[in-house]
Each structure stands twice: as structure tokens, then as C-alpha cells.
Amino acid sequence: MKKIFFIILFNLFSLKNLHALIEIDITRGNLDPLPIAVSPLHVDISSEKVENLKIKDLGLNISEIIEKNFKSTGLFNPLKRDAFVQKPDIAHLKPRFEDWRLIKAQALVTGKLLIKNGKLKVEFRLWDLTAAQEMTALAFTTTPSNWRRVAHIISDKIYERLTGEEGYFDTRIIYVAESGPKNQRVKKLAIMDQDGFNTKYLTLGNELVLTPRFNPTNQMVTYMSYFRNMPRVYLLDIETGTQEVVGNFPGMTFAPRFSPNGKKIIMSFAKDGNSDIYTMDLDTRVVERITEHSSIDTSPSFSPDGKFIAFNSDRSGLQQIYVMRSDGRNVKRITFGKGIYGTPVWSPRGDLIAFTKMHKGRFFIGVMRTDGTGERLLTENYYQEAPSWSPNGRVLVFYRETKAGEKGEGFSAKLWSIDITGYNERRLSTKTDASDPSWSSLLSK
Amino acid sequence: MTLKTNLKNIFLVIFTTLLLSACSTAKKSGDIDGDVYTGKETVEFLATGVPDRVFFATNKSSLTTASRATLRKQATYLRKNKNLNVTIEGHADERGTREYNLALGERRANAARDYLMTYGISGKRISVISYGKEKPVNPKSSPLSWSQNRRSVTVKVN
């Protein structure tokens, strides 16, 4: 009897999953990625020389970044260049649509670039090969050293035009770079472009740092540091490098995030064995206590309209996710599934909450509606947590750790991403081991 | 408040002990009793016969009978050494989310601190710091090492 019950439950569970996979919106494209040809950008021969830059290859380099971005979405299938039927400059003027259709391309990207008076001028066009017409065209001017960003911005414009959604390529990820043996980890704040390039370290590794998060304009970061062995929430200005402790709390502050308008930091403050949620206004320095409960309240995350806060609490015994109004009233538990839940993060679109679930010794990253219904588990692994949303709310980045042996060997921490459809799981390239990722908003917005 | 918590904890311990004795053959393996480390492997000493740490069950911060005995030894030692101040470090194992574990470590360190205070040690002499899961003593991924990592450690400051 017991066995039958179990089987029924199991079937329900798998049906639910099955349903989840079919319930995909616009990103159904990943079942049948759109064949797209990205022609290398034509380089104007009158271009000036620029130090440390191979101008001749720049057009190809930019198109390669665009291809890589497209491929990483799982929505596009960039076609091999050796099948291309027209020279870049000629295709850019007007492609022979029927020839490109022969290689099964449905969309074509062409462009050209010129370096003049120390400026990089780029233009590109996106062609609909089936309808035989131009879909979008754009030209812009920037400094030559920005060429990688040019590629990302072009990728975003094309992604937007083809999916109807904002892109997420001209973005950065801040994370904790890890090195050293597992029981003596050195951790530094690091920042990189979304595709793993331009890594910069923001701290030296002298003290333990954790959980960095961007503000809405991506210029400030809030994080936790054990500077002078006092675990506190800090605020860092990325441009100037200046940093300060947030507030004057007589104990550990942790789990910081910005409010959607960037004016407040919300965080936990732990005292006498009890963690509660507080906000501090960065202009007025006014501190407000949001929760007052003898349980652990942590991992707060605002809804994008600022009206609600999702957080993690063990007031029911074990870790669960709760939602309350931003003044702390009307607290409601939203997770009732099997296992325990942590790290709620509100989607930038406002429709979903991403979370970590722990059940029977396994770790899951999932999403649910903001009332806790419609739970979908996207990925299961030995250890993973801390999802962070892409700015368009379509992709999650998180970190995953592996099992360690007797002396800690075999241990690694890496960044991974997955679409909220549950498809397209991939590892992000980082120079070192990495954890606690936080995705910026679009830089060029 | 503290007294109430203590009473509650005592009930918990009695209850847990009853539960454990009911299924001790199944749950007791090596140096883990239920879920709590009972071995000596990682333990250091503040002085002869005064262990520096106590261990916790997964997601819990309640003190076991053995933990209380250890802390009473620490309290006796601290009463004898009136000028000595300590920091209690609270730790969690690696099988939980980072932020929750920071809070859990703080709660564990304070459970130990509260107990020392009920045995007459001034709170002014005891600071706490939580490291969450950041400083495992045993790097291996196994139930045994996790049980060794779920701990609070009393460290001399001066």
C-alpha cells in the first residue's frame, strides 16, 4: 500500500516537471534555435592605426563575440563562416537574400567599421532573409578600446529585435574569486564582463569577503567583509575605490542588497543569537528595523516596485521563504513544498522569485510565483545556491561546488547559468574558482 | 528569558536523549551520535581537561548534554582566570546557504555564550563572531567532517 502511494506521488512529481518543460513562453526557440549568419564586420581600409589593436582583425573579432553571445542563449544557431556566400562589404550594402537562404540562414547580421580621429565608428544591419528585408540598423561612435562592448551592444540590439525582450550582453558580473585550499580559502571581490573577459579584482584578499551585489546603476556594490575581524556590510564605489561600513551596528551585519531605487541597503543584523532584517537609507543614514522575531530572518530581497520584501526565515522551525510588505507588515510564508528553502531573489520583471531548495541532501535552483505557487525546479546538483537574475529576467546565474576528498582535494566552486525554462545550463568562464555571483543591469541603458 | 530558553533546551535534550536511546543502534556510528560529533579528533584544549569546542546537530543550535559539560569546564576555567577574555566562534557545515549559515553560526556562538553566562561568566568577557561555513576545520565532504565543522570554538583573546 505504502509503495503504491509512493509511486503515485512520484508520478505526480514527474508530471509536474514535464508540464514545466512544455510551459515555455517566447524562449521556445531553444528547441529549434534560429539559424543566423553573422558576417564579419567590414573594416574600412582608411582606418587609422591604434596601439595594441589589430585593426585588420577587429571586424572578425566583433562578429565572433556576437556569435558567442548568441550561442550562449541557446536561442540562436550561428552558422559556420566558411559557408558564407558574400563578402562582408557587399552583403552589408544589400545581401543576395536567396543565396543566404541556401545555407539555411534565416537572419543575417552585417556591418562595417572605421577608425578615424581616434574614434571607432561602427554600423550594423540585421536582415530578415525570409522576408528579404532589413529589420534594424544602427550606427554609433566610441573609443576604440571599447570594441568588446560594441560587440555586446550590437548583440543586445539584435536579441531585442528578434525576441522582443531586452538583451543582457552588455553587462557585468561581480562575484567572489576563490583560491587556495578549502579550509584556507582566499576570497577577493572580482568583476568581469558577462562573457568572462576583462576580469578585475576589487580587493586584495587580505580579508574574507562575501555576497557582493550591484546597485541599480552598477556603480556601487554592497558586500560583506571581515575587515579587522568585524563582519560588516560595506559599500564600495567601483570607480573611485572608496568604501565604507554601512551603519553603526554593534554586531554582525550581512546579506546586503540594494533597494530597487538604490537609496537603501537592506540587510540582516545579528545580535544575541537573533538575526533580523534592517534597512539603512544611504542619504539620511536612517536605520529602520523591518522584522522583529526571535528566529533567523535573512537573505532579504525587494520586489522591483519596492513594495514587498522576500526573505528567508526559520520561524516555522526550518528555513522557509516569506514575503512581507516593505514596512514589515503582513508576513506570509510562501514555501510549503518538501525540503527547505533559502536565498529568495525577486525577478527584475516582478513575476517570479528564484530560490535555493535543499531536499534529501541535494540542492536545487528553482523559480516560483511570488505567492509560492507554480514552483519549478530548474537544476539539481550536489551543492549549488545563490541565484542572481539577468536584467531581463530570463536567465539565472548561481554557483556550484563539488565534493571534496580527504584533504579537500577535488573541491571547486564555479559559476553556472541556466534559463528559467530549465534549458541551456552552462558554466561561465572565470579565471579562478568563483562564488556569490551578482548580475548587473544593462550598462548602456 | 534565558532561564526559559534553558528550560526549553533541557526538555529538548531529555527528549532527544529518549529518542536516541530508542534507536541508538541505528543512529550511533563511530564518533557521531545522532547527528552530533562526539569524538576528540579536532578538539583542542584551553587548558588540561578543558576542551575548546562543542558540536551541534544539523541546523540546530541547542546544546547537548556533552556540550553543557564541556562549557561548564570552560566556565570553571574562566572563573579561575579572571583576567582572561574569550571570543566564541560559531561555525556551520557546508551543506547550507551561505547567508543562513552566517546567522546560524552566530546563534550557535551565542548559545555557548549564554550557557557560560548562566555559570557566572560576565558577558563582557565573551565576544562572539560567526564564520558561517567559511572556515571548516575538516575540508572533506562527508557526514563525519560536517559534524566536526558544526561547532562553536572558545578562543582566548589575551
Image (tube, rainbow, N blue to C red):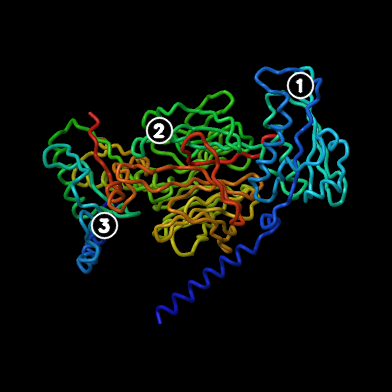
Q: Are marks 1 and 3 on the same chain?
A: no
Please name which of the two marks, 1 or 3, marks the residue nearer to the observer: 1
Please tell me in which quadrant of the rendered image residue A52 appears: top right
Residue under pointer 3: B9
Estimate the x, y position of residue A350 in percent, counting from the top left.
Answer: 64, 52
Q: Is residue A284 visible?
A: no
Disc 1 crowd, CA 10 A, few/some/many (<14, 14-19, 20+):
some
User: Which tag is nearer the camera, tag 2 or tag 1?
Assistant: 1
- Which quarter of the figure has residue A358? bottom left
Of residue A184 and residue A51, the one placed in the foreground of this image is: A51
Q: CA distance from mark 1 to mark 3?
A: 71 Å
In front: label 2 or label 3: 2
For numbered disc 3, what is the local secondary structure? helix
Q: Nearer the viewer, residue A397 or A34?
A: A34
Relative vertical location of residue A372 with respect to residue A138 in this rendering, above or below: below
Q: Is residue A43 left or right of residue A259?
A: right
x, y (%) of residue A383? Answer: 43, 51
Residue at 24 percent across and 36 percent down: it is: B155
- CB-based contact (under 8 Å), mark 1 and mark 3: no
Q: Which residue is mark 2?
A: A186
Q: Secondary structure at mark 1?
A: strand
Q: CA distance from mark 2 to mark 3?
A: 37 Å
The residue beneath circle 1 is: A119
- Give the Cα separation between the discs numbered 2 and 1: 41 Å
Quick check: B124 left or right of A250? Answer: left
Residue B40 x %, y %: 18, 47
Residue drawn at 35 percent across, 44 percent down:
B106
Question: Callout 2: helix, strand or loop?
Answer: strand
Identify the amino acid type marked 2: Val
